[in-house]
């Protein structure tokens, strides 16, 4: 198993990166990730990889971070999501937004990835929600779970987020905006109205 590759970018095509590692060219499927648009020919990069071995195919899938690779490995355990579908989900959403979507039950956002339907997105949420963990964002370490019934600030956050959802925003957008609003306020006692007002500024 190849855990990661470090080498020189020798070629960039749509969804594919050619990496020169000590004279050996590895073709890596990276989907439509922003990762591929942020690099240039000749750059030295590290790509976290997963090798998919099938009877008629051996392919490498690559990611900018170990966190994305970890989520990719979880996604391919879901029936109906293969490596190609999983890399599209990761590249379309990124690790943190995908984690938000799973924890908040936002199938609509996941289904926006190419080749992923609403039913498959719902199945991913059902099967992975408990595996994601306690709702902590890997990037921020903050809790993003919804509807847990806990008292205190989480209730205020949930109330503000549900108000945004009622206005037509997706669950992922809503909970992320509330989290950003709370960070800006730097006030644990902020009520739902104050959070909602600042979340709308963030979304607007």
Image (cartoon, rainbow, N blue to C red):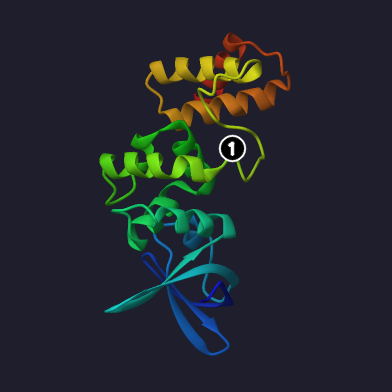
The answer to whether residue 143 is above or below residue 198 is: below
Q: Is residue 166 above or below residue 42?
A: above
- Measuring from the top left, give residue 56's x and y in whole percent: 27, 79
Q: Residue under label 1, please give it.
A: 134
- In the picture provided, is 131 more to the left or to the right than 136? left
Q: Quadrant of residue 155?
A: top right
Tell me what residue is drawn at x 34 percent, y 35 percent.
108
Q: How many marks?
A: 1
Picture quadrant of residue 196? top right
Q: Secondary structure at mark 1?
A: loop
Residue appearing at x 63%, y 45% in the figure = 139
Residue at the bottom extreme, as displayed: 23
**Residue 49 x/y as whole percent:** 50, 69
Q: Is residue 24 above or below residue 1?
A: below
In the rendered image, residue 78, in percent from the top left (x then y), is placed at 36, 52
The residue drawn where x is 26% and y is 44% is 117
**In front of the other: 173 or 35:** 173
Number of residues whose C-alpha sits closer than 10 Å to that of mark 1, classed few (under 14), some (14–19) or many (20 or more): few
Left or right placement of residue 32 versus residue 1 in this view: left
Whether residue 120 sits left or right of residue 129 in the image: it is: left
Identify which residue, 155 or 84, lies in the foreground: 155
Q: Is residue 90 above or below residue 41?
A: above
Frontmost residue, 78 versus 57: 78
Q: Quadrant of residue 84?
A: bottom left
> Residue 104 in the image: x percent, y percent?
46, 31
């Amino acid at each position: 198993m190849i855990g990661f590759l470090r080498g020189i970018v020798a070629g960039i095509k749509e969804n594919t990166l050619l990496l020169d590692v000590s004279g050996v060219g590895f073709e890596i499927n990276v989907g439509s990730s922003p990762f591929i648009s942020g690099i240039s020919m000749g750059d030295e990069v590290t790509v976290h990889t997963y090798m998919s071995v099938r009877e008629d195919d051996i392919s490498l899938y690559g990611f900018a971070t170990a966190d994305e690779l970890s989520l990719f490995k979880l996604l391919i355990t879901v029936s109906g999501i293969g490596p190609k579908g999983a890399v599209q989900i990761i590249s379309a959403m990124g690790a943190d937004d995908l984690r938000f979507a799973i924890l908040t039950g936002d199938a609509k956002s996941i289904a926006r990835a190419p080749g992923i339907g609403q039913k498959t997105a719902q199945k991913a949420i059902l099967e992975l929600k408990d595996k994601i963990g306690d709702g902590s964002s890997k990037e921020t370490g903050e809790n993003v779970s919804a509807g847990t019934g806990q008292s205190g600030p989480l209730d205020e956050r949930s109330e503000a987020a549900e108000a945004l959802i009622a206005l037509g925003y997706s669950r992922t957008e809503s909970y992320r905006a509330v989290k950003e609003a709370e960070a800006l306020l730097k006030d644990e006692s902020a009520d739902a109205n104050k959070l909602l007002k600042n979340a709308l500024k963030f979304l607007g």
